[in-house]
Image (cartoon, rainbow, N blue to C red):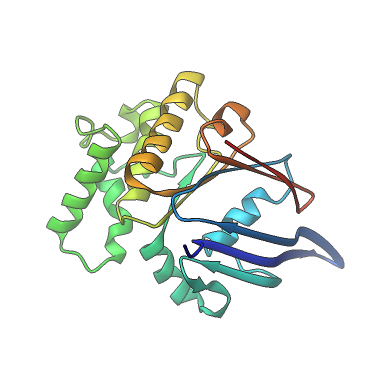
Amino acid sequence: MTPIVNLKNLTKIYYKGDSEILTLDHVSLQIEPGEFIALMGPSGSGKTTLLNLLGGLDTPTDGEVDVCGQDLSVLSSRELARWRADHVGFVFQSFNLLPVLTARQNVELPLTLQPLSSQERRHHAEVALRIVGLEDRMDHRPSELSGGQEQRVAIARALACDPQLLLADEPTGDLDAKSAQDVMELLKRLNESLGKTIIIVTHDSHAAEFARRELHLEKGVMHMERKR
């Protein structure tokens, strides 16, 4: 089976004045289709940087980033945007929903990059909202939803384009314990029932328990992993 993620000697350096900040240090990693990965480590360890590189939101200083069969280093900014729209769904800690739009309209937003009619966009959005259990909240705005429901809308938005890879950065960070549990159970179902490859960045050891494999970063170096 061809890995959905194949990283070789991935290095990322940021420059601040005359200083170099080594964020990722020769990270090599393979992830198979259908895996559920929890990426853990202390603040500043490079977790979010790695997630951004996997999603084509950032470019490496050195090394190879092959995701969904594509070498991301050879793509232009416009090509990366097109690639992201076709292959990757993002879920963020702060939900990033537009307050003036309904749940359905928020889910439809990324679909405007696809060659779909307005009817097709609406259908895709409604299917995604049903998958996350929000068929009765489609016409509600974010202010009319709980935090857990807002995050489920964000997950539906990430699913709407039927991505191969779902990337979530601290998806339970702004949620209470019950809502966090519900969101992680939803992600687990998406992995098991729909076969989605999911990578989450988290500080929460309880959230990490839902993953099948834990990867640990510290000071930009991959130190260990744990399989379940």
User: Could you say where residue 226 lies in the image, as x and y percent from the top left?
Assistant: 65, 39
The residue lying furthest to the top in this view is 178
Q: In this orientation, which residue lies closer to the viewer: 57 or 211? A: 211
Q: Is residue 17 visible?
A: yes
The residue lying furthest to the front in this view is 1
Left or right of 111, for residue 2: right
Q: In this orientation, which residue lies closer to the viewer: 72 or 173? A: 72
Left or right of 155, for residue 139: left
Left or right of 144, for residue 44: right
Residue 105 to residue 64: above or below: above
The residue lying furthest to the left in this view is 119
User: Could you say where residue 224 lies in the image, as x and y percent from the top left?
Assistant: 73, 45
Left or right of 142, for residue 4: right
Say which quadrant the C terminus sits in. top right
Q: Count numbered badges in the picture.
A: 0
- What's the residue at 27%, 66% (across, down)? 114
User: Could you say where residue 160 lies in the image, as x and y percent from the top left?
Assistant: 30, 51
- What's the residue at 58%, 26% (across, down)? 206
- What's the residue at 66%, 69% (across, down)? 60
Residue 221 to residue 115: above or below: above
User: Could you say where residue 213 lies in the image, as x and y percent from the top left?
Assistant: 58, 42
Q: Is residue 99 visible?
A: no
Residue 98 to residue 117: above or below: above
